[in-house]
């Protein structure tokens, strides 16, 4: 469930929030007893400290993760998206515009070759095909964060749209110079 589990590391403290209660305000801190005992009672609180409704939502999310085998889906769909992005990076017709592919599961990024505004061009082409993708970072990067319960069919459709957009940008007009934060200048 956590990225740290991919490297066999045991962190001193693991902090989580947001998705653990499907949007309700809740966070969690996990640590060894001797570290948590150093925290004085009543000194930790805030918006995400939890309440009965948020805690019930958190329990429901944990139950759904198990019953719906969400992590199995994340691994399968993430592998499909990663394979498509890696293939585009290796393809002779598109590799010049892709600098890097990185991430785990369903939180992946494709960094485009700098200085040409490729990410914004790919984003625009995806939008004309009814797929929203997010450009991010000071680098020319597209971040992919589909829903954890995305279906195989929807992932295939999304991958095809992204692949077509990458191919069209690579084959098409010369992209404009990159602006700040990965956005193309017009």
Image (cartoon, grey):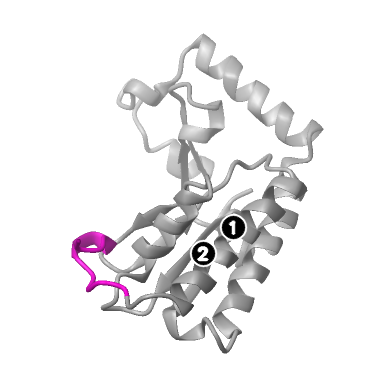
Which residue extends farthest bottom? 92
* Image location of residue 128, percent across then percent down: 47, 50
* Image location of residue 124, percent across then percent down: 40, 56
Residue at point 72% right, 29% down?
64
Q: Is residue 32 magenta?
A: no
Mark 2 lies on residue:
165
Circle 1 sits in a helix, a strand or a loop, which is it?
helix
Magenta range is 175-186
Residue at point 23% right, 70% down?
178
* Image location of residue 155, percent across then percent down: 68, 51
Circle 2 sits in a helix, a strand or a loop, which is it?
helix
Mark 1 lies on residue:
161
Query: How would you rate the neighbour count of disc 2 (Cα within 10 Å): few for under 14, some for 14-19, many for 20 or more?
Result: many
Q: Is residue 185 magenta?
A: yes
Q: What is the number of callouts on the image?
A: 2
Reply above or below: 71 against 6: above
Pick the front one: 165 or 99: 165
Q: Mark 1 touching mark 2, by CB under 8 A?
A: yes
């Amino acid at each position: 469930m956590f990225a740290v589990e991919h490297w066999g590391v045991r962190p001193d403290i693991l902090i989580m929030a947001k998705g653990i209660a499907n949007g309700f305000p809740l966070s969690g801190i996990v640590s060894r007893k001797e570290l948590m005992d150093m925290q004085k009672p009543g000194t930790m609180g805030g918006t995400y400290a939890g309440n009965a409704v948020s805690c019930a939502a958190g329990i429901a999310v944990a139950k759904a993760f198990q019953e719906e085998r969400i992590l199995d889906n994340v691994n399968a769909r993430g592998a499909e998206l990663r394979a498509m992005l890696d293939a585009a990076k290796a393809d002779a017709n598109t590799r010049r515009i892709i600098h890097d592919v990185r991430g785990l599961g369903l939180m992946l990024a494709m960094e485009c070759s700098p200085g040409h505004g490729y990410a914004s061009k790919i984003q625009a082409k995806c939008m004309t095909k009814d797929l929203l993708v997010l450009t991010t970072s000071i680098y020319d990067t597209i971040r992919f964060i589909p829903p954890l319960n995305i279906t195989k069919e929807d992932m295939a459709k999304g991958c095809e749209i992204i692949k077509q957009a990458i191919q069209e940008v690579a084959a098409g007009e010369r992209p404009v110079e990159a602006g700040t934060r990965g956005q193309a200048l017009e």
